[in-house]
Structures are given as structure tokens and as C-alpha cells.
Amino acid sequence: MCSQTSRFPKWVRLEAGAHDLRFLAGTLRTRSTFDRAFDLSDGDVLVVICDPIETKWFWEERQPANLWYIGILTSADQP
């Protein structure tokens, strides 16, 4: 669990193996959550980025949903 202003960890070490994870994005007005399972090998890096609905400026158009980007970098991807 992390946010732009919190002191929660932005990086968490996960051991190799199966992981059931819950992802949550929340703003003052909205909240979305989903679960996803991953099977990580030794040396894999799970990267998760959320672009939340909330806009910084009142004149900007609000996107209709949170946008999530999820991927795994494997040891084969690294030089």
C-alpha cells in the first residue's frame, strides 16, 4: 500500500513463488480494487503503476477510470 504523500513502502521484496495480491486506488471521491495472482521466478521484478482518476487541475478533463500498468521484468530482460 502506498501513496504520493504517505510513508508506506513504495518497494516491497517478494520471494520467488506464487503471490495473490490486491491492488487498490482511491481518491476522495472514488475507489477501485482488483486481485491478481502472480508466479514470480528468482530475480523477477513486478512493476505496478496506477494513473488515478483524480486530476490535479480543475480545468483538466477527468479520465473515466483508473489506468493500471502491470508487468514483470525477468532476469532474461536485464543485460
Image (spheres, helix red, strand yellow):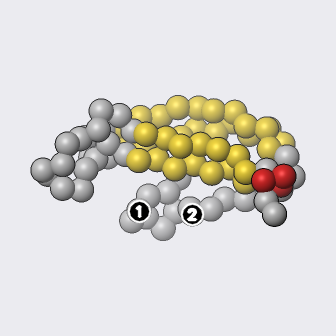
| Marks 2 and 1, how far apart at CA | 11 Å
Rendered view: 4 above or below 20:
below
Q: Nearer the viewer, residue 7 or 58?
A: 58
Query: Is 28 above or below relative to 30?
Result: below
Q: Which numbered disc, 2 or 1, marks the residue that appears first in the sequence?
A: 1
Q: Position of residue 50 (x, y in %)?
A: 46, 47
Element on which disc 1 rests: loop
Query: Of the residues shown, which amino acid type is indicated by label 2?
Result: Pro
Residue furthest left as drawn? 59
From the viewer's perspective, tell me whether residue 43 is left or right of residue 62. right
Query: In the image, residue 74 lies at what x, y percent?
Result: 79, 50
Residue at image location 41% in from the left, 35% down from the top: 32
What is the three-letter code of the residue carrying label 1?
Gln
Residue 18, by quadrant, is top right
Question: Residue 60: which numbered mark, if any?
Answer: none
Camera-nearest label, 2 or 1:
1
Residue appearing at x 59%, y 32% in the figure: 35
> Mark 1 — residue?
4
Q: Quadrant of the C terminus?
A: bottom right
Question: What residue appears at the point 48 percent right and 67 percent down from the top-left corner?
Answer: 7
Q: Is residue 31 above or below residue 52?
A: above
Q: Which mark is residue 9?
A: 2
Residue 45 visible in the displayed image? yes
